[in-house]
Image (cartoon, rainbow, N blue to C red):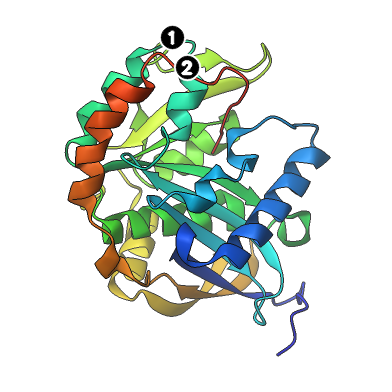
Amino acid sequence: MDGSLNKEKPVVILRAFRAIDDPEACRLFLEGHAHVLTSIGITKVTSSKDEWTTNPAAFVLIVESLDRTKVYGGARVHVAGGNAPLPIEDATGAIDSSIYDIIWEYARQGTGELCGLWNSREIAGYGIGSIFLIRAAVAISYQIGLQSLFALCAPYTIKPGECVGMELEGRVGNQGTFYYPKLDLLATTMVVKDVPVLSKAHPEDKEAIFKIRENLNIIRLEELRRKEITIHYETKIENLDKWDLQDAIANAKENLLKFKGKPDETDINFL
């Protein structure tokens, strides 16, 4: 099967899996993400590290070629209660330690974070990073069992976040926003509070997310600004019988005590 990308009529696979189940795909994700970050002059980002590849509570989405040899983009959903703090806790804890208590408040019913969103220049303009990966991440959050989903948004991802039902979490920083890690980079804390129903999602996005939830392996012709892309969604996560959200919730309480007050001041992770 040809792995090259047809720029006129691109066809890709958007696949979901648990990080610990596919080390090779995680490696390709890391390489692609690091290349994108380096190209824009960013070298210290939480999501460019590789600790998440061994986190049993990290779930990955990748956009790959039909022959699965190239990765054009990706995102992750980290569930609170893994073997590390959520990236948003690492990123904001040094500025506002209340983030740990806020995460635990949501974690009681199951929460996570959408993070590490990226797409390569090769597929730029087709909505992979701005729409379709975000929708898919919200869709698999329901499959994982989450009630809520956080994101630390850069200015250009606030609108896509709102489209899938995210709203400002104003208790962090200055009414939800702060400059970090430098004065010209604004971060905004956002959250979907009701993953199962998505009451604040825009109708078009909500319908698309529900279609993916109802048909985990589905082929959709997607369109953005008169550009079309065919996406083979493979969002049924294998080995979920080995995943227990209740164990993660129990561990999230332990993490609150373990990680609170020990933020990593050198990194940040944006959606």
x then y, percent, for residue 191? 35, 34
x then y, percent, for residue 228? 62, 70
Residue 174 - label? 1
Q: Is residue 199 visible in the rendered structure shown here?
A: no
Q: Nearer the viewer, residue 59 or 163?
A: 59
Q: Label 2, secondary structure: give it.
A: strand
Q: Is residue 162 left or right of residue 187?
A: left
x then y, percent, for residue 148? 27, 41
Q: How many labels does the image show?
A: 2
Position of the C terminus, as image quadrant, is top right
Placement of 44 over or under 68, stated as above or below: above
Q: Nearer the viewer, residue 166 or 83?
A: 83
Position of the N terminus, as image quadrant, is bottom right
Q: Name the residue under label 2.
A: 177
**Callout 2 touching callout 1 (CB < 8 Å):** yes
Residue 165 picture quarter: top left
Q: Label 1, secondary structure: give it.
A: loop
x then y, percent, for residue 181? 63, 17
